[in-house]
Image (spheres, grey):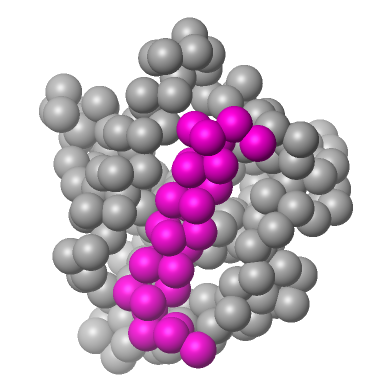
Amino acid sequence: AFGTFKNFSVLQSSIHEVWAKWNPSTMKSDTRYTIASCFLTFPMPYDNDILEIVGENYYQHRNNIMQTNHEGLTKLYNRFHFPEDTSKDIQRLRDMHIELDRSVANAYNWNDLELEHGFRETQQGIRFTISEEARREVLQRLLKLNHERYAEEVTQGLHNKKKGKRSIKSISSSKPSNSELKLF
């Protein structure tokens, strides 16, 4: 858990979703989000203060919708992805998601990237998401960044095979604070 909305912004973005869907773990035929395959390998953008503001605004609006309508995340996002739901609160959430995605792209200095948000047919059915062309471009850029950062880490001696792999348990063994838990 993180104590900032900067990280929340990135993890809620379509950019992270592209990575998580490309690099999941599997159990039987189901895909799963795991720390090892989806999170630790994801090249986070460098610090960007606007992500704190955008993330907090998105979180607050989403939370207000859920409290006002007495619904959880699943019902909320079912409405978010349903094209016929044109209520003000859901449309505002979609607009905020576009802003969040744009801010995350800018944090990577991808100002040239056209995300082309809209309702698209996916393996999960109709979803409000970025275009397939944008999805391919995001994945290509993330892979390049992942390889560059790995090469930097090798140069710094962070991937010495004799040391063995760092366990996920040791990474996640610290207990999050109450303020960190509120974010998620």
Out of 140 and 150, give the one closest to the viewer: 140
Establish if 4 lies above or below 61. Answer: below
Whether residue 89 can be seen here: yes
Residue at 26 percent of width and 74 percent of height = 46
Residue at 37 percent of width and 77 percent of height = 106
Establish if 68 lies above or below 126. Answer: above
Establish if 88 lies above or below 22. Answer: above
166 is within the stretch colored magenta: no
> Residue 147, image x and y in percent?
49, 84
> Residue 67, image x and y in percent?
39, 14
Whether residue 36 can be seen here: no
Q: Is residue 137 left or right of residue 111?
A: right
Q: Is residue 14 left or right of residue 169?
A: right
Establish if 169 lies above or below 103. Answer: above
Residue at 53 percent of width and 24 percent of height = 73
Give the magenta part as a residue range.
86-112
95 is within the stretch colored magenta: yes
- The kind of secondary structure the magenta stretch mainly shows is helix
> Residue 180, image x and y in percent?
20, 33
Q: Which quarter of the picture shows residue 100?
A: bottom left
Out of 19 and 134, give the one closest to the viewer: 134
> Residue 75, image x and y in percent?
62, 21
Out of 170 and 23, give the one closest to the viewer: 23
Residue at 18 percent of width and 41 percent of height = 3
